[in-house]
Amino acid sequence: MKKSLFKIFFSSFIILIVVQCESPKKKYFSSGKIIYEISYPCLEKNEESLMFLLPKKMIMTFSKNQFKNEFIFPTKSSALGVLNSSFKKKTKLTFRLGNNKKYTEIDSTNVNLLLEDLPEYEKTQFVAKEILFLGKPAKKIKMKSLKNDSIYEITTLNDLKIKNVNWCTPFNKIKDVIVDYSVVQYGMEMHFKAISINNFSVEEDFLELDKDYKFNIIKDYLKEIKTMLSIFSCND
């Protein structure tokens, strides 16, 4: 009888150890949506700026190591987006201005043409700070600009994993999704901060592009984008 009780107790003890070892295992979001608020620190100082024409929100829809970023403009005739199969390192950049709808494609062979005009950052030696962001585990990381040695702080989400999520951005050395950061591109400073994060199933065709978008080679596409954004530049 004592041996039987000992066996039952021992078996229960082993099961308890296994459960305790497995329970802390981290669960990651696989699909859902993040909504970012966009601000323009430099333009906000200028009362005569055309900031009212710019998007104030960006929606990131993600699923199975793929994501789509949609910039929400004040007028429906304007659109800017990113369709990113990040695990394949293939991206489509899109924009619409009235009936002018264009897109270009980026992969590992031409991503340098996109990044050469953008600032470059690297991680500092500072230890990342563990925090909660919108109730979720996150990290504050200090980054250094290789252009002027300035230190910038970004926040990354710990429980959302998208392979190569930042591969074609200035933050390509960061593995996790960034939820609070600033970036300067073509003379315009933009600050992105996530205001909501939701986990739900996403339709399989969410990366499909409308057929009325016309393809542009990357050099022509970027030239047109730079021309449009130049009117918002804060550079003297």
Image (cartoon, rainbow, N blue to C red):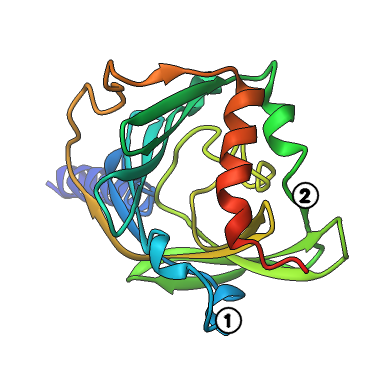
Judged left or right of residue 38, residue 181 is right
User: x, y percentage for residue 71?
Assistant: 37, 50
Number of marks in picture: 2
User: x, y percentage for residue 6?
Assistant: 23, 48
Answer whether residue 175 is visible to the viewer in this image. no
Q: Which residue is depicted at the point 46% across and 55% down?
A: 158
Answer whether residue 163 is visible to the viewer in this image. yes
Residue 87 badge = none
Q: Quadrant of the C terminus?
A: bottom right
Q: Quadrant of residue 150?
A: bottom right
Mark 2 and mark 1: Cα distance apart in space: 27 Å
Q: Nearer the viewer, residue 59 or 129?
A: 59
Seen in the picture, residue 33 relative to 214 is either above or below; the reply is below
Judged left or right of residue 110, residue 72 is left
* Residue at the disc numbered 2: 120
User: x, y percentage for residue 20?
Assistant: 33, 54
Tell which tag, 2 or 1, sits nearer the viewer.
Answer: 1
What is the three-letter code of the residue carrying label 1? Asn
Q: Which residue is depicted at the point 37% across and 64% down?
A: 56
User: x, y percentage for residue 65?
Assistant: 41, 30
What is the three-letter code of the residue carrying label 2? Glu
Seen in the picture, residue 2 relative to 225 is either above or below; the reply is below
Seen in the picture, residue 234 relative to 212 is either above or below; the reply is below
* Residue at the disc numbered 1: 46
Q: Quadrant of residue 82?
A: top left
In the current view of this chain or complex, which residue is farthest to the left? 1
Mark 2 packing: few (<14 Cα in 10 Å), some, or many (20+)? some
Q: Nearer the viewer, residue 161 or 145?
A: 145
SS class of the residue under badge 1? loop
